[in-house]
Amino acid sequence: MGTLTKGRYLVLRGLLLLIYCTASVISKGGATGDAQPDAVPSVQGTLPHFIQEPEDAYIVKSNPIKLRCRAVPALQIFFKCNGEWVHQNEHFSHEYKDLNTGLKVREVMINVSRQQVEDFHGPEDYWCLCVAWSHLGTSKSRKATVRIAYLRKNFEQDPQGKEVPINGMIVLHCRPPEGVPAAEVEWLKNEELVSSLTDDNIDTRADHNLIINEARLSDSGNYTCLASNVVAKRRSATATVIVFVNGGWSLWTEWSACNAPCGRGVQKRSRTCTNPAPLNGGAFCEGMSVQKITCNAPCPIDGGWNEWSQWTVCSSQCERQRTRECNSPVPRHRGKMCEGNSEATENCTDGLCTQNRKLLHDVKPQSMESSNDVALYSGLGAGIITVAILVVAVMLYRKNHSEYGVDVIDSSALTGGFQSFNFKNTRQGVAERAEFHAKAPAETFPRDLSRDYCSTMDRRKKGLLTLNGPFSSCKEPLRTTGVFGHHGGRLVVPNTGVSLLVPHGSVAENMSWEMYMVINQGEASVQTLDSCEILLGPEVTYGPPGLDLFCPVAMTIAHCAEVDAENWNIQLKRRTQDSKWEEVMSVEEESTSCYCLMDSTSCHLLLDQPGSYALVGEPLTQAAIKRLKLAVFGTMEVGSMSYTLRVYCVDDTPHAFQGVVAAEKTRGGQLLEEPKMLPFRANTFSLQVSIQDVPQFLWSIKPFTTCQEFSFPQVWCSNQQPLHCAFSLERYSPVTAQLSCKISVRQVKGHEQILQVYTAVAETEKESVPFFMQTDCTITSQTGPKAFKIPLSIRQRICATFDTANAKGKDWQLLAQKLHLDRNLGYFAKQRSPSAVILSLWEARHQDTSDLDSLASALEEIGKIHSKSSPKDQDECESDSIHIEASSLYGTGRLTSQNTEDCASEYTG
């Protein structure tokens, strides 16, 4: 720093006084002239006054600090540091007018660097002050010290773990590391800040100790002393505090009965060490838990009969009696009662007793003949009345039916003999369902639903699952296989929404497994489910049974439920060796044996054991909804004037709709309208399908088929099996080549969907309308890196970064949070590489998208959090690595998507 000599200082001071005097003469000489409008008022008779003085400052790392002075009135201000003047060129000054006082204020600033402070060697700290000049003299500011800030790494005293009895005092000592400025101390319990302001039982003293006046069980935990200043934060070693409870005896029980049924025995009483029970290593109760004393129990005495009494006189019923008593001896002390009867009765005339001068066995009651006649005539009358009521009911039904003008039938009648016809008008059917609905609970089902609801579903599964059309329950299962080694891969059942991801490293090196995945097409296994549960997706099996992997596989199964925890109880079940179903987990509960992630249309599972799995749901309220997919197909019978419309109602999963596609391929059907979704509620009301707006002068329709109905159990318990009904129309003339109409599908007291039909029906029309779009391509097995979206090198770097614990905990938890997978973290915690399992679940969840930008954004956000919350010298490398991984992922999705471009969507029909 440059300095001014004493001689130069005196010369400078004289020049300033000369300038001031000259300015005063000029101002006096011009007093007779015009006054200046912006003249600044002068302050006569005052020395410079400091508005702002330099403040003590600390230099953090290599960043210079700024010292400022402001004074009024002042012609000049200079800094003086450590007794020497600071060079004029190192001052930054400016002058402005104070709007409140109208006075000119001069402000001066200098920079002080770390090198300047380190080069100073004096008896005191580096200091600076300001000197301000005016026409009356000079003023000095306060001294401001400048020190280099630091905080050493090691604590002078770390807190020590303690075991304290309940209600005892806890004192944790902490002496923070040496630092400038002195470090401030805070306490953390289980990584959360401890405050004496919110808890009167806690006292944080000025000597940095933590005192808990009366220990509670909730005070057990891991305590850390956190020291911080302007430079850095330091954490002490963690001290584990355990608050234990010594056991205490409960009250004695009552004495027990004598253990000997007869003679000398023992009685005892007991007490338990539960008042309170020992906790957290507390001492067990001292003394005996059982006391015994001797006792004498009286022996039992069995009862005995005394002699029979004399026979009584013969009564009018030709009988006489005699009695005896059990008092020889009387039973005592739990002795047995006498065996046998205490009374005896016998005929006293050898069967020749007469009544009304007739033998008793020849007497015939007259009332019996009259009662037989009454029963006969009553039965005949009841039969005649029943027949009359049936005749009147049929006549009223036919009259109402013709007035209403709409035919509603149960669609199961179209199966051709499976069930009898059930004709009824809509108003009657709705009334019956309303009566059934009124008997059910108003808002919610009980946990086991109602008896009628469950029994109806049970009957549906046992006998009513036969469907219209050629759908057979003995379909061949859909199966796909692949051989996987250490690099992993993916199995896909095309067009079913079912896939299996085998992560990299799950198979040991130099080994391979032939794995398979099967979708069960039958119904036998489904019938073993509880009567109130329905299948929400296909039953999927993967194997082989002896499969041994190092990490779980990720299975994806499409489902048809509107996921809502308040309305559904959704469970994952597994079939046992005896073909029964056992619960694996509920999707709303946490489990360490399995992980289940429910999306709006798919369920993603992390599984350790091969086997057969099914997703089942139990409706908790009538607001529970499962999605139905509606589709209408048409075929023209060759050489006929008839045209058939088939309407399908199927669970909204790709696998279920695949069954419809297979059936319509064999029939040569054409899709007449884009399939639509219908929400079907668990309100026990049926589903009605009706045809509307048919041109009456061009087409005719068979009677009783304009509106058809599926019962609630048929639809709700379809269990991935398609339901359908048919409308048969006939042209009046071969010239008619177009058909336009509407198909209404509605649930009573529920939602409705309209399918618009407009199609050509001429026999010369040969072009097949595409009705199914492939979305899964035809690839069933992929192995190695091409099966994954995340490149292997980036995946390994992410795992190495996030599986390592840092001062703030496990980074993989933050990764799960940013990827919206932060529930059931206990499952990830037990894995050898939590980050690898999280990435596998992300791969399964995003298999239908080829963009990795969402993962890159999450990693970039984590990197920003690290760079903000962590000291630069500690986590700078880690934050940089996270940013590098994020930047590497941007655009990677476009490269990996090239593997799937050859599987572009195509139509089949």
Image (spheres, helix red, strand yellow):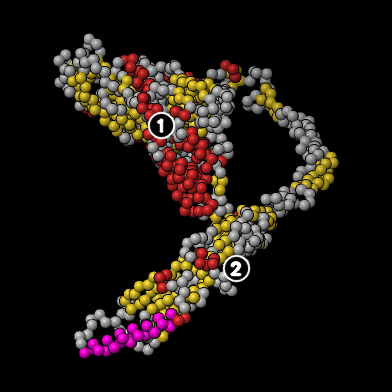
* Residue wearing tag 1: 896
Query: Residue at (53%, 35%) from the top-left corner?
Result: 594
- The residue tagged with tag 2: helix, strand or loop? loop
Sequence-wise, the earlier of marks 1 and 2 is: 2
* Residue wearing tag 2: 206
Disc 2 residue type?
A: Ala
Q: Magenta stretch: residue 511 in it?
A: no
Q: Which quadrant does the C terminus fall into?
A: top left
- Marks 1/2: CA distance? 60 Å
The dominant secondary structure in magenta is helix
Classify 10 Å Cα crowding around label 2: few (below 14), some (14-19), many (20 and above).
few
Closest to the observer: 531 or 320? 531
Q: Kindly identify which numbered label has been placed on residue 680.
A: none
- Residue 603 drawn at (x, y percent): 45, 33
Query: Residue at (53%, 25%) from the top-left corner?
Result: 485
Query: Residue at (52%, 50%) from the top-left corner?
Result: 875
- Residue 648 drawn at (x, y percent): 33, 24
Residue 24 at least partly seen = yes
